[in-house]
Every structure is written in structure tokens, then in C-alpha cells.
Image (cartoon, rainbow, N blue to C red):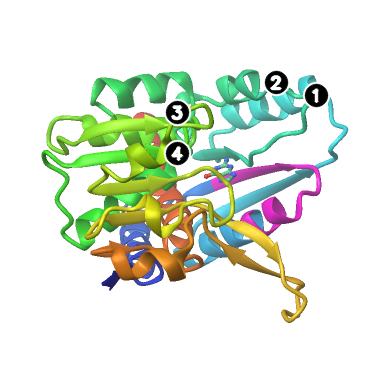
Amino acid sequence: MIRVSGKEVAAKVRQEVQQACARFIESTGNRPCLAVILVGDDPASATYVASKGKACDQMGFLHRDYHLEATISENELIKLITALNEDIAVDGILVQLPLPSHVNEHKVLDTVSADKDVDGLHPTNMGKLILGTPVFIPCTPGGILRLLDEYEIDTVGKQVVVVGRSNIVGKPIAALLMQKGRDATVTICHSRTADLAFHTCSADILIVAIGSPLAITASMVKEGAVVIDVGMNRMSDTSRKRGYRLVGDVDFDQVAPKCFAITPVPGGVGPMTIAMLMKNTLHAAVLHHGRSS
Ligand code: GUN
């Protein structure tokens, strides 16, 4: 069984971006700049945002962190995004999800200028991705593709089953893997799928992104499958100093012996998401510089 190390591949991507960033700064005199907006005090989101800032520092990017009260109005949030859209010093804008329920997520994400949308969640960028001409690939799906490539896991003609239909992972990864060149046969399952195990058992490559701890058990996986676990669930664990441990959507200990390859949690898909965000931010800066010079 191959344990797919997102930690190692993410370090490689980060090194590539760091080197490309140094060349960008040398040739343009500009430093890429990412603005990150966090609304409210969700502890997991605060941790992700802090990691994004640290990654920017390591890359040689500038970053601006906006931490807003959970009670902020939708209009105030939209006003901030509009100002960042117009600010030529800002290359990328990321609004950390989830947003508080009184804020319309679609309206907020639509406000982010498509050419600063390093998360790839703007309708224009989603549309381009579906059409097979992506500009910004959403970070987690982009990370999954890179892991498959690094481990030379071929998807042509393979049965891929995606469990989860989120805008941020399920829908885009399904769209990407069905494109010409990737050529997978893709099935998308969700919370209302009848007989989930019937579908998951047919998967050559099983991608799980449902946010449900240890939901995929050994009997739901085909012998020799590749399993990509996107789950990052906090499970109470009093033996740990921080009071919890991270587990995936897949019961790793049970499932791993049946797999050809599997991503662990932590250290699998998670580190790839931030690495791909760095790649997208540099890409935004390159596009931005091309337009402004
Ligand atoms: N929340 C969890 N993952 C992500 C992500 O990739 N991007 C954003 N914006 N929010 C998230």
C-alpha cells in the first residue's frame, strides 16, 4: 500500500512557487500580495488563515489579513471586497469559508473580481473550469490532481467515484477528472444517494469530501482502489494536549490495507490546499502584472 504524502508533495510545490516568486520579484520589482478575509471566530478557520499567512511569508509574498466580527453586515463585507478589487497592490483575494448564515455566500463570492479569485470559486472561473479552459483551479481539487500526477496514478478510463457535491471540492474535482486528458468516468454521490456502498465499491479511485468522520469503512472500498480523503474532522481526544485529533472521512486503519494507495489525515490532501493557494496567488500576480505593464 502506498501512503500518499501530501506533506512531501506540498513541500515540493511550495519550493517551486518560492523559486518562481523570486524570479517574478527580480524581473518585475513587485511582490505578490494575497488578501485573506476571515469573518467570525470559527477555530478551524482561524487555524487555516494563520497557516495561509505563514505560507505567504515563506513564499516571499505580502499578505493582508482582515479579521471581521461575525456580526458584520453583508454590505460591509462587500464594500471591503470591492475596495480590494480596486486596489492595484492586491493580486489575490480569499474569503475564508464558511461565512456566518446571515451573509449570502454566493453574493460575496460573486463580488470577488474573477482575476483575483485565487480560490477559483467565482462563477466565471467555475464556468471556465467546466468548459475545460480553467484560469484558477480551486485549491483542494488542484491539490488532488497534483497528488495523482506525482504518484503517476493514471485516470484514463478509470471509474472515479466522488462522494460529496460541494462547490469547493466535489463539483470541481468531478468536472476536472472528466475532461479530455484526464478521461475518467465520474460518478458523484451525496447525502441522498441510494446505496452509497454500491457506488463506492465500484471505484478505482474514490474521492471523499463529506466532512463526516470515519464514514467510509473497509466494506465500502474495492480491493486495490486509490482512496483520496479530503475530510479534516476534529474528534474529541482528551489524551491530546489540544483536546482533539484530526480524522478523515475515511476510516484509514480499516481501509488502508485494501488500497493500492491512500492519503492519510493529517498529511494527505490538507497540506496540498495551501500549497496550491500559493501557486494560484503567484499566477494571479503574473496575470495582473501582464495587464498593468
Ligand atoms: N474553507 C475550507 N477550505 C477552504 C478553501 O479552500 N477556501 C476557502 N476560501 N475557504 C475554505
For disc 1, the marked residue is 102
First reached walking from the N terminus: tag 4 or tag 1: 1
| Whole-number angstrom distance, CA of label 3 to CA of label 1 | 32 Å
Q: Amino acid at mark 4?
A: Val
The alpha-carbon separation of the residues under discs 2 and 4 comes to 19 Å
Q: Is residue 27 above or below residue 37?
A: below
At 46% from the left and 19% from the top, the residue drawn is 123
Check contact, mark 2 vs mark 1: CB within 8 A. Answer: no
Q: Residues under labels 3 and 2: Cα distance? A: 30 Å
In which quadrant of this rendering is ligand 1 seen?
top right
Q: Secondary structure at mark 4?
A: loop
Which quadrant does the C terminus fall into? top left
**Front residue (pair 118, 234):** 234
What's the CA distance linking mark 4 and mark 1? 23 Å
According to the image, label 3 marks what residue? 194
| Callout 3 touching callout 1 (CB < 8 Å) | no
The front one of 61 and 229 is 229
Give, as a single range, the part of the protein colored magenta: 34-48
Q: CA distance from mark 4 to mark 3?
A: 21 Å
User: Mark 2 and mark 1: span between their CA atoms?
Assistant: 7 Å
Q: Callout 1: helix, strand or loop?
A: loop
Q: Earlier in the sequence, mark 4 or mark 3?
A: 4
x then y, percent, for residue 230: 46, 51
Measured from the top left, where is residue 218 in percent x and y? 40, 59
The numbered disc on residue 169 is: 4
